[in-house]
């Protein structure tokens, strides 16, 4: 049984050339949505959309942390599909684990720019679009389990993800009366290029710490994102869903 309310809805998924975003885009197309895959990796997002192999999937190159790019790709989606209903606000970077005392301001600023500023810009554009359209919208932001518990080496990254949880709650309460729902998905370790770029011992440590003793798959995250974007979750807003093998328990 498909999820209710995704057929013919128009979705933007950021960071869709790879990993969790790519899995969500594929899942939403399967559920009947029209999906714009957005990524700063132009060639990657073209081949990701081609791989989905449906007229309902289009690729747009753009930097999710750049104000003009965000306005441009939202405009392109409205031109192509007439409106935007759903946003998986997912683009993010991990970087290499490094103790806080050794974190450079260059790395810190890059993390804040892409993981927090980028999420804010896309959230704001979706809110403006939804208020203009006048009939609601649904947003899922990708946070991380690192927002909930300390992970040595990921302090700056974790801070950006905690900020996303706060933004999610505030947007949800501010716009609940406008039919706009805003939730977060909180993944534990997931087998994507971002996680697999960490040193082997770091990856092994993350799996040992995990109650299920393993990393998740992008499809396991995408299933929850699709549920939260669908009309199966109409009474859920401002929530953060752990999808993490029990790590946040
Ligand atoms: P990934 O590297 O497979 O995919 C991330 C995608 O985002 C890439 O295609 C990349 O090109 C794109 N991207 C990066 N910066 C961008 C920008 N400025 N504009 C547009 N696109 C940009 O990684 P993933 O694991 O699928 O990560 C997706 C999200 O999930 C991230 O926000 C990440 O922090 C979060 N997350 C991942 C894990 C994990 O273990 N993999 C755990 C918790 C949260």
Image (spheres, rainbow, N blue to C red):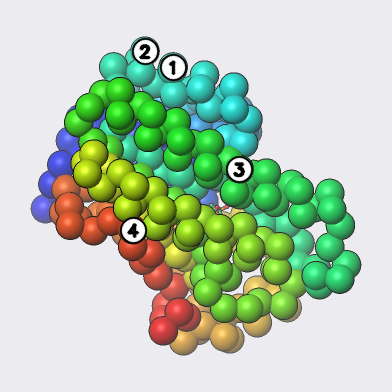
Q: Where is residue 197 in the image (x, y as percent from the top left)?
A: 70, 60
Q: Is mark 2 within 8 Å of ligand 1?
A: no
Circles 2 and 1: CB atoms closer than 8 Å: yes
- Residue 168 quadrant: bottom left
Sequence-earlier tag: 4 or 3: 3
* Number of residues whose C-alpha sits closer than 10 Å to that of mark 3, classed few (under 14), some (14–19) or many (20 or more): many
Mark carried by residue 16:
none
Q: How many labels does the image show?
A: 4
Label 2, label 4: how far apart the Cα atoms are: 30 Å
Q: Residue furthest top?
A: 79
Tag 3 residue: 117
Q: Where is residue 151 in the image (x, y as percent from the top left)?
A: 66, 77
Q: Does the residue labelled 1 lie within 8 Å of ligand 1?
A: no
Circles 4 and 3: CB atoms closer than 8 Å: no
Q: Is residue 167 above or below residue 51?
A: below
Sequence-earlier tag: 1 or 3: 1
Residue depicted at x 36% and y 13%: 79
Residue depicted at x 11% and y 53%: 1
Tag 2 residue: 79
Sequence-earlier tag: 3 or 2: 2
Circles 3 and 2: CB atoms closer than 8 Å: no
Label 3, label 2: how far apart the Cα atoms are: 25 Å
The C terminus sits in image quarter: bottom left
Mark carried by residue 76:
1
Label 4, label 1: how far apart the Cα atoms are: 28 Å
Q: In this view, does 223 lie to the left or right of 16?
A: left
Mark carried by residue 238:
4
């Amino acid at each position: 049984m498909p999820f209710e309310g995704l057929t013919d809805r128009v979705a933007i998924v950021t960071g869709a050339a790879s990993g969790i975003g790519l899995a969500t885009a594929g899942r939403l197309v399967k559920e009947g949505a029209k999906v714009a895959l957005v990524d700063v990796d132009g060639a990657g997002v073209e081949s990701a959309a081609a791989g989905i192999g449906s007229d309902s999937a289009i690729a747009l190159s753009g930097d999710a942390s750049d104000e003009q790019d965000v306005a441009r790709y939202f405009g392109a989606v409205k031109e192509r599909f007439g409106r935007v209903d759903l946003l998986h606000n997912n683009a993010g970077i991990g970087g290499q684990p490094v103790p806080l005392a050794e974190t450079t301001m260059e790395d810190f600023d890059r993390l804040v720019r892409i993981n927090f500023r980028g999420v804010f810009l896309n959230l704001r554009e979706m809110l403006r679009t939804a208020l203009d359209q006048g009939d609601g919208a649904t947003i899922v932001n990708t946070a991380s389990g690192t927002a909930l518990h300390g992970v040595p080496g990921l302090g700056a990254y974790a801070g950006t993800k905690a900020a996303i949880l706060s933004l999610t709650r505030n947007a949800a309460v501010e716009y609940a009366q406008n039919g706009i729902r805003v939730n977060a998905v909180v993944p534990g370790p997931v087998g994507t290029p971002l996680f697999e770029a960490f040193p082997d011992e770091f990856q092994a440590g993350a799996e040992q710490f995990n109650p299920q003793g393993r990393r998740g798959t992008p499809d396991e995250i995408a299933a929850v994102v699709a549920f939260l974007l669908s009309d199966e979750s109409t009474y859920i807003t401002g929530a953060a869903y752990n999808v993490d093998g029990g790590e946040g328990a």
